Image (spheres, grey):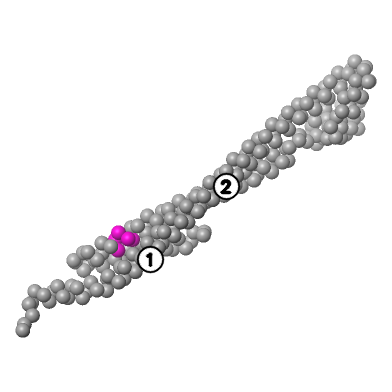
Amino acid sequence: MRSDPAESPNRELQEKKRWVEPVTALLMALATLSTAWCSYQSAAWTRKSNRLMNEFNALERKAGLLSIQGIQQATVHTTMFMQMLAAQQAGNEKLVNFYVERFPPDVRKAYDAWLAERPFENPNADPHPFVPKLYEVRGTREAAEANAEAASSLQEARNAGTVSGQYLANTVLFAAVLFFASASGKFEQRRVRVVAFAFALAVFAFAVIRTLMLPQ
């Protein structure tokens, strides 16, 4: 019994497409797993970015509070010093001693150092005890440290957000791989089928390299 000549091209086409199906299935499976992995990593880095932003906001508020408290305390100390000078000018030594004895330790230290410069006799002496070399506003150092930590947290949050975006971009690439790999098996022309599959394979390799270069 002779075979139908029309069946030969179809059989030959089926033989040529056999190699595409298992390779395409493997490529699609890998692309699906890679998409899930990149989605997971994108979500994880987004959570890290949000956590770091919360730390940044907390540290920024802490630095602002320390600065405000320091300014308020410095205002009180300056007022006490001015009242002490007014009492001294009025010759009320009892009131002078009252204020001096109630100076906080840091203000008393600055005041004693200022008196050691003989300000009422030495024209080169500091004008008051609250110059930076004699007096440090309370919380200044802590506020500076909090600001530095806040800046570091902000930079890390931005970096984490960038990584999250890159992982998300990779999911788009893997989605393109799934589309072209799936479409490659449906084309009848061998050249179109090979080009679609080769494009899917190239995009997959590019996406995998991008993923491996990103921090985990």
Which residue is rendered at x = 23% and y = 72% of the image?
17
Find residue 190 and report its horizontal and vertical position in percent. Answer: 21, 68
What amino acid is found at the position of numbered circle 2 in the picture? Leu
Q: Is residue 4 left or right of residue 40?
A: left
- Residue found at the very far bottom of the displayed protein: 1
Disc 1 designates what residue?
30
- Residue 13 visible in the current orientation: yes
Quarter assignment of residue 21: bottom left
Q: Is residue 58 left or right of residue 123?
A: left
- Residue found at the very far top of the displayed protein: 90
- On residue 114, the disc is none
Quarter assignment of residue 166: bottom left
Which residue is rendered at x = 80% and y = 23% of the image?
79
Which residue is rendered at x = 5% and y = 84% of the image?
1
Find residue 8 and report its horizontal and vertical position in percent. Answer: 12, 76
Q: Is residue 36 left or right of residue 48?
A: left
Which of the two discs, 1 and 2, labels the residue nearer the N terminus?
Answer: 1
- Say whether residue 179 is magenta: yes
Front residue of 158 and 120 = 158
> What secondary structure is the magenta-colored segment mainly?
helix
- Say whether residue 127 is magenta: no
Disc 2 designates what residue?
52
Find residue 45 and report its horizontal and vertical position in percent. Answer: 51, 52
Which residue is rendered at x = 53% and y = 48% of the image?
49
Magenta span: 177-181
Number of marks in the rendered image: 2
The CA distance from mark 1 to mark 2 is 33 Å
Front residue of 173 and 98 = 98
